[in-house]
Image (tube, coloured by chain):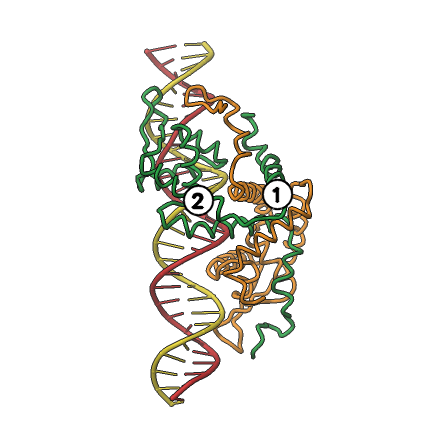
Chain colours: A orange, B green, C yellow, D red
DNA sequence: CTCGATTAGTCAGCTAGCTTACTATTCGAC
DNA sequence: GTCGAATAGTAAGCTAGCTGACTAATCGAG
């Protein structure tokens, strides 16, 4: 009984409910995109992006090289490169080349970067909708990450 | 110089395990990206992308206008526009303008599009890692989508 | 010392989201 | 009939992932 209709009779019921039959991976992608979209609105009020937020978090602990940042954030080198370019342009991080290895750039957070991080750090939690069994949900996400990331980031376990 | 460190204080524990403390939203984004990455490898062997796969799925039922496709896929109009451009270039869909409303383009799947969909439809399920309580996990995702999408797609409930 | 392999980072080019701004068509009020 | 509002779609320009190809610096084997 699929009352999913064609062009002229496009009814309201055609919109929502079918999503319950979507494959899990597609739900995952959709949920992720929508959540990101929600805090993007907040973040760019303070000059940040989602990708930059992750980097600022990682730099709170200590300065790091770009390769380290990429590995910790689970993205590729080139992606970090551009994210840092933006953060630097905004004055949130500094890059200086490592005197002991001139291939490396040591990235550190600036005072302005620390300020903006302090404004943003709670957002990341506040903007996340609540779910019924948060621990089960988080475990599932961690399991997915572990199994999917195995081929790319395993070597440093 | 064997250490991976910048200022010799960065310990090994800084690498992997810390992810367990990541905010849930960031885990969601990371998991989503990694899963997408996994099947991207498979999909482009048959000339498809993740975005195209969703569209082909939606078109299996019946031809639709671009605005309908965008709404059903939970993306904006412009995004669908380019996705369709690619699918058309590959010969997987056709666009004809609606004779009864020449602003509209009716999008329909071609035989080649149906073929490629049949090759790909199982991938979407097979590539998804298993989780402990799939039903809880799916419910959580649906809840997140519902709450996040409210402002953008609610009007047609 | 030299030369090849490895490592850090960048550049170009692709898809996929998004926003803002635009054209073309249709509809509706007058 | 005309003119303004609403709708369908496109275009440009942004961030963010990715791959593949490149430079520069370091390491290491001979």
Q: Secondary structure at mark 2?
A: helix
Q: Say whether mark 1 and mark 2 are on the same chain.
A: yes
Residue B90 - label: none
* Mark 2, residue position: B50
Q: Which residue is depicted at the point 58% across and 32% down?
A: B151
State the image quarter where residue B93 is shown: top left
Q: Position of residue D30 (x, y in %)?
A: 38, 88
Q: Which residue is depicted at the point 44% across and 44% down?
A: B50
From the viewer's side, name the closer residue of A98 and B3: B3
- Find out whether the residues at labels 2 and 1 contact each other: C-beta distance under 8 Å: no
The answer to whether residue B8 is above or below residue A80 is below
> Which quadrant of the rendered structure holds the C terminus of chain A?
bottom right
Q: Which residue is depicted at the point 52% across and 23% down?
A: A12
The answer to whether residue A101 is above or below residue A40 is below
Q: Position of residue B143 (x, y in %)?
A: 62, 37
Separation of residues labelled 2 and 1 (CA atoms): 21 Å
From the viewer's side, name the closer residue of B35 and B100: B35
Residue under mark 1: which chain is it in? Answer: B
Q: Is residue A35 left or right of residue B94?
A: right
């Amino acid at each position: 009984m699929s009352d999913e209709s064609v062009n002229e009779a496009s009814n309201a019921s055609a919109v929502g409910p079918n999503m319950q039959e979507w494959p899990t991976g597609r739900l995952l992608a959709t949920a992720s995109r929508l959540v990101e979209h929600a805090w993007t609105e907040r973040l760019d009020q303070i000059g940040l992006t989602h990708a930059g937020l992750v980097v600022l978090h990682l730099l709170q602990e200590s300065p790091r090289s770009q390769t380290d940042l990429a590995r910790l954030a689970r993205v590729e080198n080139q992606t970090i490169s551009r994210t840092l370019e933006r953060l630097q342009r905004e004055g949130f991080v500094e890059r200086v080349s490592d005197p002991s290895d001139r291939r490396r750039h040591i990235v550190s957070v600036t005072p302005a970067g620390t300020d903006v991080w302090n404004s943003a750090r709670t957002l990341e939690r506040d903007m996340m909708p609540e779910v019924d069994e948060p621990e089960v949900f988080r475990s599932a996400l961690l399991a997915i990450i572990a199994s999917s990331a195995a081929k790319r980031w395993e070597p440093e376990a």
